[in-house]
Image: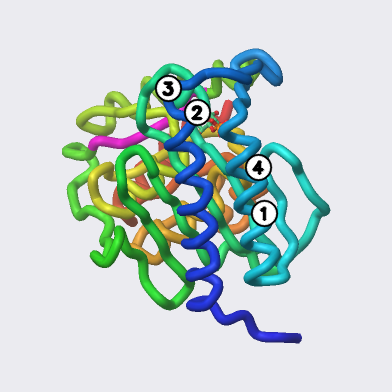
Amino acid sequence: MTTLDYNELLGAADRAARAGGDIVRRYFGHLEGVREKSPGDWVSEADLASEQAIRALLTRDSGLPVFGEEAGGDDFDTGWLVDPLDGTSNFVHGFDAVGVSIGLIEDGVPVVGVVHAPLLDRTFCGAKGLGAFRDDRPLRVSTRAPEHGIVATGFPFRHKDLLPRYERALAAALRRFEDLRRAGAASLDLCWTAEGVFDGYFELSLGPWDVAAGGVIVREAGGVVTDWAGDDRAWLRSGNILAAPPAVHAALLDLAAATDR
Ligand code: LIP
């Protein structure tokens, strides 16, 4: 078994994310080629071109397999999970909260992550044992008490069957925390949690490409990442995620358990 060099792979992910981000920036405000894959699920020329550029660079620089949101790929235990434009609805509406998200999983566990926000001009990264950073600044999750926390979330707008449970969680979260935010790009919600801007994050049924990179970044910033039942691996596949500093994570777990009816 070869050992992965996380530092080197972080460099590869960073180059690829910036290349994807350059493409996203060029297309912003030009909406040719936007189409709806399924209700509320948008794809644009920018997603496709960004993914193509990212794939080519990751393959050239690492030789590891790539699975992308748009073009898919083979299943693997060790390889790259890529969202070439996270927050496509934001992008289509001209809202600049979008991320290019590249996560590396090793034996099914996220170990390296880069989230580049091309329209906000910042890049978040993290790797197992190496810490988490926004550009060169180390990241740390917040220490606010849950009742003073502003917690991010995303609505399951494409999965109406999840609404009853989600609505119970949303109502409980509004009571438990000071306030909530819904910015529309899961990868950035996770990075803002790692940065201590948000005090936690919860969402249901995301894609692994939405959360792999941000999940490592939160963990390396001192946060806890699990699914809604507290499992620390299953969140990647189910996309049911709770990510927060320990005290807010505990509050989110209670709330998730109380709404599991
Ligand atoms: C989106 C997420 C967003 C979530 C949506 C969607 P996409 O990613 O980042 O937060 O609520 O369900 O998955 O599809 O724009 O890459």
Residue 254 lies in the magenta-colored region: no
Q: Nearer the viewer, residue 50 or 241?
A: 50
Q: Which residues are magenta?
A: 150-155
Magenta stretch contains residue 152: yes
**Can residue 256 be seen?**
no
Q: Which residue is mark 3?
A: 29
The residues tagged by marks 1 and 4 sit, at their Cα atoms, a distance apart of 24 Å
Question: Which image quadrant: the N terminus?
Answer: bottom right
Instruction: State the separation of the CA atoms marked 2 and 4.
Output: 17 Å
Left or right: residue 98 versus residue 78 is left
Q: Nearer the viewer, mark 2 or mark 4?
A: 4
Q: Amino acid at mark 3?
A: Gly
Say which residue label 4 marks. Answer: 238
Does the beta carbon at disc 2 come under 8 Å from ligand 1?
no
Q: Mark 2 and mark 1: span between their CA atoms?
A: 40 Å
Say which residue label 1 marks.
55
Q: What residue is rendered at 45% in x and 41% in y? A: 99
In the image, residue 191 lies at what x, y percent? 37, 49
Q: Earlier in the sequence, mark 3 or mark 4?
A: 3
Q: Residue at x 22, y 39 (%)?
A: 149
- Above or below 244: residue 24: above
Q: Position of residue 98 (x, y in %)?
A: 42, 35
Instruction: For ligand 1, tell me if the residue under mark 4 lies within 8 Å.
Output: no
